[in-house]
């Protein structure tokens, strides 16, 4: 993958080591270190996971296990716009599952996928208690709520056309 | 004690200055909900408008009052001391508000209530709003009153005085007061907090740790988020009191990843507390040493299980551990640890600021105190309320929440999230205490109450919870990950017309198997399907035997049809994501093979033009044989 290949090699690994230099083995630093990497690159490249493992003194397999266990860590670069689909119960009651089907069909991807042109990705998000906006999605973290199904179709089409949805 | 009084005096000076006597103030409510409803634009418009008009007005921030249905909420305090609350103040309404402020008048269209000061003709007092009636605000007493990012605001309300008192008591005395108060864990297990603290106090091993479980993973519950964002210091003070009682020297507040603002505000609050000598060594000059940090989760529901949370802090996947050993024996870093919910800790400062007698004035004999609830779904007023235990649920859902909008019937209530279940709307008068819910095969839970109207399918909601539980299973126990997967498959079949009468027996058998899972996640996954079998048997039978979804919601059991060649069909064809609205000559029809039942076409067409119908013809139902 294009973006991933730039996130490898000695220079990249050096940068990651610098980024996580303050973290220590034997304690509680794995998740904070992974958050830091995720925040910096928008995902956790494999090479970075290996460097984090070395820094906090854990086998790389265990670190990778943790990364894939938690749903908010990505292992691939994000799309230009990530559609966070709220899976919560208030959204569900108000047509949230239909919103999901619309985004999947319009974008031609499944939950967790990205369009080939990298314009849009679908992410299963969890309820954070903004339920007066149900049904809702987040476009790169920004709320679009009280959606009608027609709204969902229009947003998906705008994303396909390369608009950021802002 | 002198250290505390010094802090308090400084804080009161800051607080009094913030009140800006004789000056008009515009105070906006700031939490994740108001942000989601456009707070940033509102604040920008206020700043710009105040500058452009040259108004001599102070713009200030507070937390939310829980009036989430009308965020962004703005309070205007006039120079004479009158406070009026305005609701739904989106950026486009700011000019109208500022024009009124400029003229010293009321912006009548946006005004909601008088908060304090003189009465205003035609405007209710805040406490007379239906949303407020019956609420007793103890935990939330400062939510919406103080700036959560300024420690002095909390200190000026006698904040940390409960700690100052506890620090002059012995650990045994502190624990006795907790036990006498009857405060039990708000996370769901309802275990007496004082006993849990005593386990840690008497545990062997150093250092001892405290953990605040702010992982609030139940979708539909955000009561912890309210406190984290709007009154962070009440949680810190509660943990400090627990530290006094238990001898713990370090703590973690484990906040779920989805609560970005809560993480930010808790970090800010910890830094300010440290700066004032409320964390660190020799706290308040009274000898105790304790510090703590915010630990950010990364998206895993099982980390809400206390041992899953421990694994997560201990550099691992958040997989719940096998008990024993219990956290009080071997918790985080294998050291003695106490884990409590946000609301549990937040009750301690209230108790120690007041008294056991005061604390027990609210609630029932078995359940003293108050409880926060977040109400959502098909309800007029979405928000967070606080009521004494034992209040009828109808007071919260019908009174404060305003019931189901549009005159539709209240079909079902979902208390307590995915590991609880669904009860019929006829049980709306149940008292809000855990014991009342158990006979109906559900749990009251951590504070979420989601309401479903008559046009929603309960089985679809249950299916969602099963999908959720399957997805969030850590994978340790086959009973859990395999059992939940099997339950999802069965519900997928039932909701798409492939259900079999024997499915109900199979579900019950699976439920028994899931009981053998290690943690509550697997043990309680069957609650939702079992509650559906018990409480919504008729709806279940309609799906299984008649292949019919009475709410016409399950996509496998409905069709979309063009009922009349009326207006809006061209728009319907244009909006359809799959091209299923097909034009043939002048007529339109729906190509069933392409239709994904998203409802977009029916929305944009004129009413009645497109209709939802049952997919299968009515069948004669043969009654199940008696056994």
Image: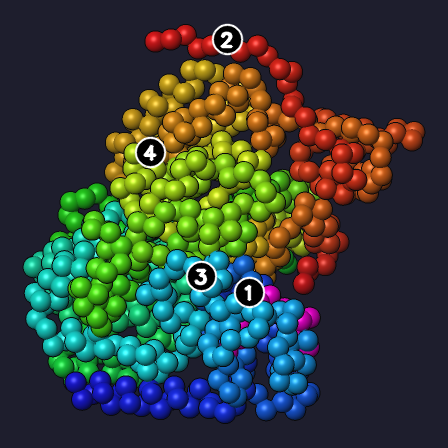
Kindly indicate whether the residues beneath marks 2 and 3 are on one polypeptide chain.
Answer: yes
First along the sequence among labels 2 and 3: 3
The percent position of residue A46, horizontal first and vertical second, equals: 46, 55
In the image, is residue B65 above or below residue B533? below
Q: Which mark is residue B573?
A: none
Which image quadrant: the C terminus of chain B? top left
Q: Is B552 included in the stretch rendered in magenta?
A: no
Q: Which residue is mark 1?
A: B71
Give the number of the mark in front: 2 or 3: 3
Secondary structure found at label 1: loop
Q: Which residues are magenta?
A: B83-95
C-alpha span from label 2 to label 3: 51 Å
Q: Which residue is mark 4?
A: B441
Q: Is residue B268 visible?
A: yes
In the image, is residue B623 above or below residue B40? above
The colouring scheme, among rainbow, by chain, secondary structure or one colour, is: rainbow
Kindly indicate whether the residues beneath marks 2 and 1 are on one polypeptide chain.
Answer: yes
Q: Which residue is mark 2?
A: B622
State the residue at coordinates (68%, 45%): A149
C-alpha span from label 1 to label 3: 15 Å
Secondary structure found at label 3: loop
């Amino acid at each position: 993958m294009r973006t991933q290949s730039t996130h490898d090699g000695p220079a990249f690994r050096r940068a990651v080591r610098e980024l996580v230099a303050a973290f220590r083995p034997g304690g509680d630093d794995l998740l904070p270190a992974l958050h830091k990497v995720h925040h910096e690159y928008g995902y956790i490249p494999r090479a970075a996971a290996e460097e984090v493992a070395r820094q906090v003194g854990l086998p790389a397999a265990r670190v990778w296990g943790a990364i894939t266990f938690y749903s908010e860590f990505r292992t691939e670069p994000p799309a230009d716009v990530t559609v966070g689909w709220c899976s919560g119960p208030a959204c569900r009651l108000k047509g949230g599952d239909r919103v999901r089907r619309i985004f999947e069909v319009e974008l031609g991807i499944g939950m967790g996928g990205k369009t080939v042109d990298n314009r849009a990705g679908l992410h299963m998000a969890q309820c954070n208690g903004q339920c007066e906006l149900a049904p809702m999605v987040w476009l790169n973290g920004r709320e679009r709520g009280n959606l009608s199904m027609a709204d969902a179709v229009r947003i998906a089409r705008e994303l396909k056309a390369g608009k950021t949805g802002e | 004690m002198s250290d505390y009084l010094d802090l308090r005096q400084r804080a009161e000076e800051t607080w009094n200055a913030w009140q800006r006597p004789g000056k008009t103030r515009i105070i906006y409510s700031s939490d994740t909900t108001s942000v989601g409803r456009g707070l940033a634009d509102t604040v920008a418009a206020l700043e710009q408008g105040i500058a452009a008009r040259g108004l001599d007005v102070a713009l200030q921030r507070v937390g939310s009052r829980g009036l989430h249905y009308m965020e962004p909420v703005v309070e205007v305090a006039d120079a004479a001391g009158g406070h009026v609350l305005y609701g739904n103040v989106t950026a486009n309404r700011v000019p109208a508000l500022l024009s009124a402020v400029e003229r010293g008048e009321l912006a009548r269209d946006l005004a909601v209530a008088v908060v304090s000061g003189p009465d205003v003709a035609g405007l209710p007092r805040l406490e007379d709003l239906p949303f407020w009636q019956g609420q007793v605000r103890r935990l939330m007493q400062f939510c919406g009153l103080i700036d959560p990012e300024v420690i002095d605001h909390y200190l000026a309300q006698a904040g940390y005085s409960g700690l100052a008192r506890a620090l002059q008591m012995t650990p045994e005395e502190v624990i006795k007061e907790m036990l006498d108060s009857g405060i039990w864990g708000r996370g769901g297990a309802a275990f007496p907090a004082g006993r849990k603290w005593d386990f840690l106090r008497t545990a062997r091993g150093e250092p001892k740790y405290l953990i605040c479980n702010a992982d609030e993973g139940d979708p539909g519950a955000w009561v912890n988020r309210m406190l984290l964002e709007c009154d962070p210091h009440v949680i810190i003070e509660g943990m400090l009191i627990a530290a006094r009682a238990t001898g713990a020297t370090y703590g973690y507040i484990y906040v779920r990843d989805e609560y970005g603002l809560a993480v930010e505000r808790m970090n800010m609050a910890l830094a300010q507390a440290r700066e004032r000598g409320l964390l660190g060594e020799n706290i308040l000059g009274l000898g105790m040493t304790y510090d703590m940090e915010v630990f950010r989760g990364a998206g895993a529901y099982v980390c809400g299980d206390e041992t899953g949370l421990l694994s997560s802090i201990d550099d691992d996947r958040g997989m719940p551990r096998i008990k024993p050993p219990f956290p009080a024996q071997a918790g985080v870093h294998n050291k003695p640890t106490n884990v409590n919910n946000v609301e549990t800790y937040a009750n301690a400062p209230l108790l120690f600021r007041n008294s056991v007698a005061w604390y027990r004035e609210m609630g029932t004999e078995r359940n003293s105190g108050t409880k926060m609830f977040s109400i959502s779904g098909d309800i007029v007023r979405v928000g967070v309320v606080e009521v004494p235990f034992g209040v009828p649920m109808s007071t919260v859902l019908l009174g404060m929440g305003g019931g189901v909008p549009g005159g539709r019937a209240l079909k079902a209530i979902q208390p307590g999230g995915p590991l609880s279940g669904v009860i019929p709307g006829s049980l709306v008068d149940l008292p809000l205490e855990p014991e009342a819910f158990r006979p109906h095969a559900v749990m009251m839970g951590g504070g979420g109450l989601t309401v479903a109207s008559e046009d929603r399918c309960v089985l679809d909601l249950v299916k969602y919870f099963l999908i959720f539980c399957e997805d969030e299973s850590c994978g340790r126990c086959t009973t859990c990950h395999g059992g939940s997967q099997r339950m999802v498959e069965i519900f997928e079949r039932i909701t798409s017309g492939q259900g079999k009468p024997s499915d109900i027996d199979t579900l019950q058998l699976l439920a028994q198997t899931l009981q053998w899972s290690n943690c509550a996640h697997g043990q309680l996954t069957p609650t939702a399907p079992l509650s559906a079998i018990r409480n919504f048997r008729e709806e279940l039978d309609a799906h299984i035997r008649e292949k019919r979804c009475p709410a016409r919601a399950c996509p496998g059991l409905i069709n979309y049809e063009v009922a009349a060649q009326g207006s809006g069909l061209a728009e319907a064809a244009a909006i359809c994501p799959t091209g299923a609205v097909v034009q043939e000559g002048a007529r339109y029809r729906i190509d069933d093979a392409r239709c994904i039942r998203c409802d977009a076409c029916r929305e944009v067409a004129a009413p009645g033009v497109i209709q939802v119908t049952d997919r299968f013809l009515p069948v004669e139902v043969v009654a199940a044989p008696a056994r």
